[in-house]
Image (cartoon, helix red, strand yellow):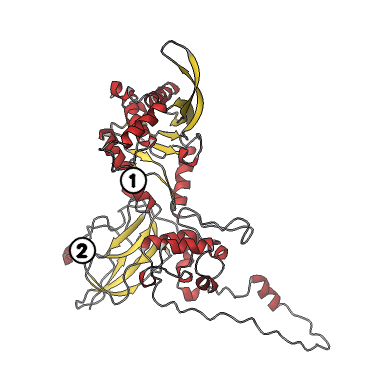
Amino acid sequence: MAIKTFNLPDPGEGLVEAEIVEWKVSPGDSVKVNDMVLEIETAKSLVELPIPWAGTVKELLVEVGQTIDVGTPIISIDDGKGGDEAPAAPAAGAASAEAAGASEAILVGYGAKAGATARRPRKGAAAAAPVASAPSENAPTETEQIAAAAPVAEPVAPAPRTESPAPPVAEAVSREGRPKAKPPVRKLAKDLGVDLWSVQGSGTDGIITRDDVQAFVSGTGSAAAQADSIPAAAAVNGAAASGAAAYAPFGSGPREERIPIKGVRKMTAQAMVGSAFTAPHVTEWITIDVTKTMELVDRLKGSREFKDVKVTPLLVLAKALVLAIRRNPGMNATWDDAAQEIVQKNYVNLGIAAATPRGLIVPNIKDAHGMSMLELAQAIGQLTATAREGRTQPAEMSGGTVTITNVGVFGVDSGTPIINPGESAIVCFGAIRKQPWVVTDADGTDEIAIRHVTQLAVSFDHRLIDGELGSRFLSDLAAILADPAQALVWG
């Protein structure tokens, strides 16, 4: 037989590590070419990986929860053919000589990119060692070891003492196999710091549902299940999703907790620091009467063409932004410091900042400039649904040209957003509120009326966008939201 070792491939977009989320196979299982064998989580998305060979699973070389580097061996496969153990699947890409010689299936995107920058070992690399080598929680601390080594004066007449019996320890629960739960439920449990072994499933055949996990966290889950588990606050303590931290309820647990910086949170931090300290940011605001936009939203909701899509003011803003960029193309450019050039983008890949359980991500709608209002609505709906499920792929978050962040959904009026790296402008959409507003009628008479009012802000890179250009762009956006009919004139 020939044993082949499959290494963690390059997930793309410059990512150099990933966390093992779920194995879909076990030793002894038969697999075919392109069968999905595991799910990994990168700093940008959840990705399922196929196996490039057919055969029988020999061994799973890494455990769920481990974060490993690209090129690390993760699974071995017995292909059923004679011969010695085959070398591991190369991490250098699909053009390996071995793959070509064996005429095996080559999967697009596999292998680390040639010439990729070498990466220093992580400080926590020792955590990837076998569990047996990890120190026990009951091992003596350094202070205890020093105390044990120090000479102690023996008492002249030691008094006999009676040691109290140790408190009974609950019998360990058998954990053969895995708790029954679907991948989205496992991801939710991971984000909330819940051990699925502690949750009693209410679904068919004892399958754990989303409601079961949420009930367990809120303390309304099965008493029997919770009695066998550690307190919910302790389960949450120290646990974190790859990007969004999972915090214990305030006032419970230890006074402080340390949450690993990884995944989306790590990527976001690097991107925001890089942007804030590279591009000189300028932010401008404008307050608008968007009553006519709200009327348009109501009409579109009742339209037969839009009955299968979600219509919101964000949709109108997205369309208005595309038109405003057409009138002010300099807003859709980037600064290339290495080449000392300004790169003008004659297309719009519209980013929509999305808050997800994994943290902040910014997927973008490719070629939004060529879409109708209905197509934009469909694209925004698909983008948000994919982000909510944690299935946004790295390619969907690359190549953006301008971004919208909608803080209004949180009831916030405005903000000073940081520009997404690789772009030069970001628009902040505030909450729409009913407020008194001065309205001038056809006779020139002013009166106070209750109108729908919002604030827009735009942050831009002052290296290539002057105040005049940024102001004209923001003014054009406001004009369309104040009267969407203006789009017919400019469109």
- The N terminus - image quarter: bottom left
Residue 37 visible in rendering: yes
Residue 230: x %, y % from top left: 55, 70
Q: Earlier in the sequence, mark 2 or mark 1?
A: 2
At horizontal 83% and vertical 89% (from top left) the residue drawn is 157
Q: As drawn, which residue projects farthest toward the right?
A: 156
Viewer-proximal residue among 275 and 174:
174
Residue 215: x %, y % from top left: 49, 62
Residue 239: x %, y % from top left: 51, 61
In the drawing, does residue 391 fall left or right of residue 269? Answer: left
- The C terminus - image quarter: top left
Q: Quadrant of residue 465?
A: top left
At horizontal 41% and vertical 13% (from top left) the residue drawn is 442
Q: Quadrant of residue 476?
A: top left
In the drawing, does residue 445 fall left or right of residue 351? Answer: right
Q: Quadrant of residue 207?
A: bottom left
In the drawing, does residue 407 fall left or right of residue 315? Answer: right
Q: Which mark is residue 383?
A: 1
Give amino acid for label 1: Leu
At horizontal 33% and vertical 51% (from top left) the residue drawn is 393
Give amino acid for label 2: Ala
At horizontal 50% and vertical 60% (from top left) the residue drawn is 123
Q: Which mark is residue 99?
A: 2
Q: In the structure shown, which secondary structural element does the residue marked by tag 1 occupy?
A: helix
Viewer-proximal residue among 119 and 157:
157
Viewer-proximal residue among 477 and 127:
477
Asked if disc 2 and disc 1 are in contact, CB closer than 8 Å, the reply is no
Mark 2: few/some/many CA within 10 Å (<14, 14-19, 20+): some
Q: Is residue 342 above or below residue 56?
A: above
Q: In the structure shown, which secondary structural element does the residue marked by tag 2 occupy?
A: helix
The residues tagged by marks 2 and 1 sit, at their Cα atoms, a distance apart of 36 Å
Q: Is residue 24 above or below residue 378?
A: below
